[in-house]
Image: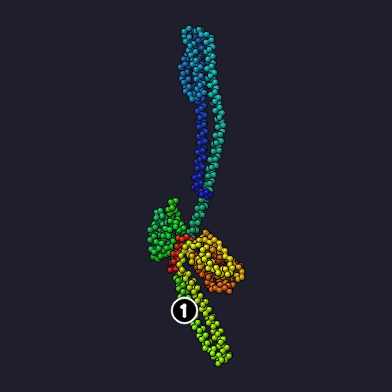
């Protein structure tokens, strides 16, 4: 999936989105509830203050009415409401003051009201006291007017306060409807979003589950095909667990050693006991080098003991996993039975050794009769010269015709035949020397080191400087790399290629030779290109064969060994050679040599030493 996500991450993201949406929805609902609760508390507070204010007004009205009735009639029964209201008024006033204590405007308004109430209450008390002393009809109309005026002021203050509070309640009440509408829309949108998210998540989960089932089916099919391939290629699967020192060996792997599926324990000690004692140290060293990442690939060849007691050659290849601290955790790979291959390699090695010995002995023994032929040819030439010297004084006795005949035989036919014999002996000697040189390639011990290819080619060019100058050859050298290889072998390859390029240039035309190199991820490809005679497509199979040459090179001296020598040398260097050519235009020979580090080169050198041995 994109961005490194998997199904588990999507489930977690979906759960997070749902959780966040529910939390946000809950917070919105709680906020609306809190606002409604605050509004209810406020309205309850306002109505309670209105009630207390009206109670105070009713108490004051009862007090004023009772005093007025008592003053006008002198009947003390009118003072009964006054007494009740007078006793209740201090509590009502105290409750109103406490309720409006933190409300600055209302508190000031309440204090103003209380001042007027106290003033009115004192006026009523003074009128009652005056009545008690002077009797009915003694209070003037002016005093009653003052009483009525103060009563009106108190009523005005209370009604104004009640009106303010009612207006405030109405304002708050007007805000309820929009909030109800907003809350309804919030609930509606939240419900739609919630249902949409759940629906989308459900569809996504169903889709992922469907894809998971498809992937599971594909994996099962791939596993089935993998097992079929593994069984068909005679490979067994293993997994080394370095944490608990155990090894998993597949049924096929155990069957390769003649054991049943439950016959071998899964601990490493059991597996180690199956390794050939002579291969154990090398097996552990290769594994150790891979574990510490000294070698990039794990490729181990060793012998394991079969149930019948025989030793089977195995090639183990695998890949490891390391933790964040650089400690290896597991390594999984395959074991391939290469016993038959090893047996064929041994037979081929023995056959190759026998062939090399035969070639060496044959070439060496052929040189003895060649020496005799050359020596006795020389003796025969001396004897012919001596016969010629002895017969020359007798030419008059022999006659003109006989002497002419003897002179032709002694001075032309026999020397010419001896010359042919000498040339054939020299050519045969050259051929046997070349055969011996080719046979020694397999025994040559290559010593790989860091080599400057530029310096090696310059050395070869210096050795060919006379031929290059005499043929007016323009040599272009592009930058050449440094690589790990055998310097002597590389010099022999470059020398032969350069010699061929110079030797087979077209006569009478300026020669051009270009040396270059292209680096790939795995090797270096050297190219030497010329504008010489070129090679006919029909002769392409003859170029690298021993004693075979292209048909357009008959006027150039050579034995047809150079390219065969180069190909044999490159094969021992794990390289390759091929060419591109066009008759009359020129030829480009390409030489590839693998990229190697000094460590891998030393390992290859050890293997070559064993092969040579």
| Residue 239 position by quadrant | bottom left
Residue 161, above or below 556: above
Q: Between residues 123 and 538, which one lies in front from this camera angle? A: 538
The image quadrant where one finds the C terminus is: bottom left
Q: Residue furthest front?
A: 393
Residue 404 in picture, x, y percent from top left: 57, 88
| Residue plotted at (51% across, 54% down) | 218
Residue 67 in picture, x, y percent from top left: 50, 12
Q: Between residues 379 and 254, which one lies in front from this camera angle? A: 379
| Residue plotted at (48% across, 66% down) | 488
- On screen, residue 546 versus residue 277, left or right, reads right
Residue 173 in picture, x, y percent from top left: 55, 28
Whether residue 271 is visible, yes or no, is yes
Q: Residue furthest bottom?
A: 397
Q: Residues within 10 Å of mark 1 (few under 14, many from 20)?
A: few
Mark 1: secondary structure:
helix
Q: Between residues 267 and 185, which one lies in front from this camera angle? A: 267
| Residue 544 position by quadrant | bottom right
Q: How many numbered callouts?
A: 1
Q: Between residues 314 and 253, which one lies in front from this camera angle? A: 314
Residue 137, above or below 284: above
- On screen, residue 473 versus residue 311, left or right, reads right
Colour approach in the figure: rainbow
Whether residue 502 is visible, yes or no, is no
| Residue plotted at (57% across, 68% down) | 469
Residue on which the image places disc 1:
368
Residue 221 in picture, x, y percent from top left: 50, 56
């Amino acid at each position: 999936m994109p961005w490194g996500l998997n199904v588990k991450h999507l489930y977690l993201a979906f759960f997070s989105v749902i959780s966040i949406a529910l939390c946000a929805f809950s917070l919105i609902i709680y906020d609306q509830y809190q606002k409604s609760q605050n509004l209810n508390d406020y309205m309850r507070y306002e109505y309670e203050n209105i009630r207390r204010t009206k109670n105070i007004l009713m108490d004051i009205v009862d007090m004023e009415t009772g005093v007025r009735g008592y003053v006008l009639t002198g009947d003390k029964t009118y003072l009964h409401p006054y007494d009740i209201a007078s006793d209740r008024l201090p509590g009502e006033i105290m409750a109103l003051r406490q309720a409006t204590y933190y409300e600055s405007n209302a508190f000031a308004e309440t204090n103003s009201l209380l001042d007027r109430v106290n003033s009115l209450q004192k006026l009523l008390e003074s009128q009652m006291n005056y009545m008690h002393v002077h009797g009915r009809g003694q209070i003037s109309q002016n005093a009653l007017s003052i009483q009525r005026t103060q009563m009106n002021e108190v009523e005005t203050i209370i009604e104004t306060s009640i009106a303010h509070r009612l207006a405030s309640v109405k304002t708050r009440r007007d805000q309820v409807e929009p909030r109800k509408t907003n809350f309804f829309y919030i609930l509606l949108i939240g419900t739609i979003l919630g249902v949409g998210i759940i629906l989308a998540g459900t569809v996504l989960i169903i889709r992922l589950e469907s894809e998971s089932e498809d992937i599971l089916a594909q994996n099962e099919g791939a596993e089935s095909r993998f097992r079929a391939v593994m069984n068909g290629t005679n490979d067994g699967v293993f997994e080394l667990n370095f944490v608990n020192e155990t090894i998993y060996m597949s049924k096929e792997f155990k069957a390769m050693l003649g054991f049943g599926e439950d016959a071998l324990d899964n601990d490493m000690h059991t597996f180690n006991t199956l390794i050939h004692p002579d291969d154990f140290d090398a097996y552990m060293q290769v594994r150790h080098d891979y574990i510490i990442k000294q070698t990039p690939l794990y490729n181990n060849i060793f012998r394991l003991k079969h149930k019948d007691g025989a030793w089977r050659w195995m090639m183990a290849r695998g890949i490891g996993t390391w933790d964040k601290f650089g400690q290896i955790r597991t390594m999984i790979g395959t074991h391939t039975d290469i016993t038959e291959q090893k047996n064929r390699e041994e037979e081929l090695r023995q056959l190759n050794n026998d062939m090399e010995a035969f070639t060496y002995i044959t070439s060496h023994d052929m040189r003895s009769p060649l020496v005799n032929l050359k020596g006795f040819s020389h003796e025969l030439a001396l004897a012919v010269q001596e016969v010629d010297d002895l017969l020359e004084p007798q030419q008059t006795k022999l006659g003109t015709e006989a002497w002419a005949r003897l002179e032709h035989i002694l001075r032309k036919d026999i020397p010419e035949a001896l010359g042919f014999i000498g040339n054939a002996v020299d050519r045969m000697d050259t051929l046997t020397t070349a055969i011996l040189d080719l046979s020694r390639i397999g025994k040559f011990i290559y010593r790989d080191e860091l080599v400057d290819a530029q310096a090696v080619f310059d050395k070869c060019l210096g050795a060919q400087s006379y031929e290059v100058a005499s043929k007016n050859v323009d040599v272009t050298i592009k930058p050449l790399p440094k690589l790990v290889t055998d310097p002597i072998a590389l010099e022999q390859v470059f020398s032969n290629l350069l010699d061929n390029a110079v030797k087979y240039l077209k006569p009478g035309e300026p020669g051009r030779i270009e040396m270059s190199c292209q680096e790939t991820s795995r090797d270096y490809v050297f190219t030497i290109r010329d504008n010489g005679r070129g090679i006919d497509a029909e002769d392409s199979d003859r170029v690298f064969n021993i004693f075979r040459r292209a048909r357009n090179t008959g006027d150039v001296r050579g034995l047809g060994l150079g390219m065969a020598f180069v190909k044999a040398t490159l094969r021992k260097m794990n390289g390759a050679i091929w060419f591109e050519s066009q008759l009359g235009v020129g030829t480009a020979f390409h030489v590839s040599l693998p990229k190697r580090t000094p460590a891998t080169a030393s390992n290859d050198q050890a293997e070559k030493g064993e092969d040579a041995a």
